[in-house]
Image (cartoon, helix red, strand yellow):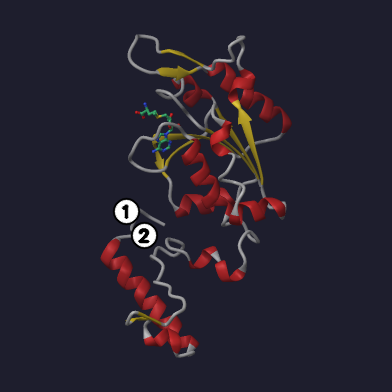
Amino acid sequence: MRIDIITVLPELLESPFNHSIVKRAKEKKLVEINIINLHDFANNKYKSVDDYAFGGGAGMVMMIEPVFKAIEKLKSEREYDEIIYTSPDGEKFNQKLANQLSLLKNIIILAGHYKGVDQRIRDYLITREISIGDYVLSGGELPAAAITDAIIRLIPGAMSDEQSALSDSFQDDLLAPPVYTRPADFNGWKVPEILLSGHTAKIENWRQEQSEERTNRFRPGLGDKDGEKG
Ligand code: SAM
């Protein structure tokens, strides 16, 4: 899989992909992540990619021309399955969407900035708009990193068996059960006996019950058609 992220702040994306599962997935050649500096596509000597909003008002707007040029260059090199714009008013990102995107071959993620992007970018160049939640961040870099991370851990081989993404929350519309490690007794705070029993079937049963109980308590309706679905 290949993920190209277009940004005005490439520095913000230096670290997120150089650790842990994402780093190992890159080393195993399961994914290639490219950070594209939008300023490289500016057509002025100041390399600026934003301008005042027509009609006035606070905040600068990302211009269409550099974004168009960046996307056209990428599209001339390969075909893309999705060209995503991160936006607070996009469809809400969740595990189901992460699963869908993890099956794609090539995607572009455009990280917005300032007041947002010229609407024509959204109307003519973007195939999908994704929000990571109902709050506003300063830029689309952190959303792009969150989306990319969530996708990559789902690519077969990215995680080892014991880390399997399949047992994480939301995969089956359930929250994950609690986990414990040594010591079994800390200051009198004990690990549930069942986990020390060595009885695999009973442990699995307990985990399933815990998942269901936590889902009912914290996220009732998870998995329903219009809830916050997995
Ligand atoms: N004026 C925009 C609005 O009210 O919807 C917000 C612009 S925000 C300051 C700048 C950029 O950050 C957006 O263009 C978008 O790319 C990104 N962004 C901010 N919050 C986001 C969120 N919750 N999900 C996805 N992207 C977000």
Across and down, in percent, residue 130 comes to: 45, 39
Ligand 1 is within 8 Å of the C-beta of the residue at disc 2 = no
Choose top left, top right, bottom left or bottom right for residue 45: top right
Cα separation between marks 2 and 1:
6 Å
**Is 70 left or right of 194, judged from the image as shown?**
right
Q: Please say if 90 is above or below 17.
A: above
Across and down, in percent, residue 215 comes to: 32, 66
Q: Looking at the rendering, in which quadrant would you find the C terminus? A: bottom left
Q: Quadrant of ligand 1?
A: top left
Residue bearing the label numbered 1: 227
Q: Residue at x 45, y 32 (%)?
A: 139
Q: Please say if 218 is above or below 77.
A: below
The amino acid type found where label 1 is placed reads: Gly
Residue bearing the label numbered 2: 223
Q: Residue at x 55, y 51 (%)?
A: 151
The amino acid type found where label 2 is placed reads: Gly
Mark 1 residue element:
loop
Cβ atoms at labels 2 and 1 below 8 Å apart: yes
Mark 2 residue element:
loop
